[in-house]
Image (cartoon, helix red, strand yellow):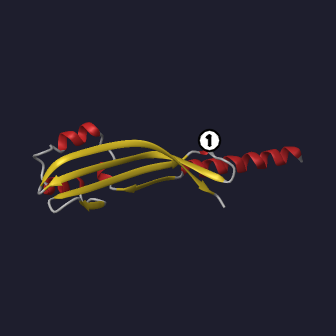
Amino acid sequence: MYSRLSSTFKAFACIGLLLASSGCASSGNDSIEKENSSTVDSKIIDGKTTKAEVKSLFGDPEDVDYRDKTTEIWKYVFSKSHYDPLAMRAFQSVSKGKKKTLTVMFEGNVVLKHNFSASDFEQSTSNW
């Protein structure tokens, strides 16, 4: 009987591990998924690149903010995460991933300045 319980437990543990490790999610603007600071800097030239060029490179921004009548800020965000079965906590699932953000400030129709950042993150979700 002990052998049968042990085999059943191992089977359920393996299935649980596979399910937990297979979850992946991404959100945001896919156009910046493969970008880094160097590639963005080669595509956006402060004082030269126009709104139309930025839009053709990265599509519509996720967020647009207006600082004043002539200054506009576009924001692009992309995040990708995966469940980490080794970091599971009691009654919680843990996902880890990377978040990328591109912020472009325009003065009129031309890029005034831009910034690209990438950071790792960890997020816990309750299983209740």
Report the quarter where the C terminus lies: bottom right
| Secondary structure of the residue carrying numbered label 1 | helix
Q: Which residue ends up furthest to the right in the rendered image? A: 1
User: With 38 as the anchor, is 121 left or right in this view?
Assistant: right
User: With 117 as the anchor, is 71 left or right in this view?
Assistant: left
**Percent coordinates x, y for residue 7 in the rendering:** 78, 45
User: With 47 as the anchor, is 97 left or right in this view?
Assistant: right
**Percent coordinates x, y for residue 94 in the rendering:** 58, 48
Vertical order, 66 against 13 (above or below): below
User: Which residue shows up at 20% across the image and 58% down it?
Assistant: 72
Q: Which residue ends up furthest to the top in the rendered image? A: 38
User: Which residue shows up at 53% across the image and 52% down it?
Assistant: 23
User: Which residue shows up at 16% across the image and 48% down it?
Assistant: 112
- Residue type, mark 1 in image: Leu
* Nearest to the observer: residue 33 or residue 41: 41
> Number of callouts in the render?
1
Vertical order, 29 against 122 (above or below): below
Check disc 1: other Cα within 10 Å, few if <14, some if 14-19, many if 20+: few
**Percent coordinates x, y for residue 103 in the rendering:** 27, 50
User: Which residue shows up at 15% across the image and 50% down it?
Assistant: 111
The residue to which callout 1 is attached is 86
* Nearest to the observer: residue 59 or residue 20: 59
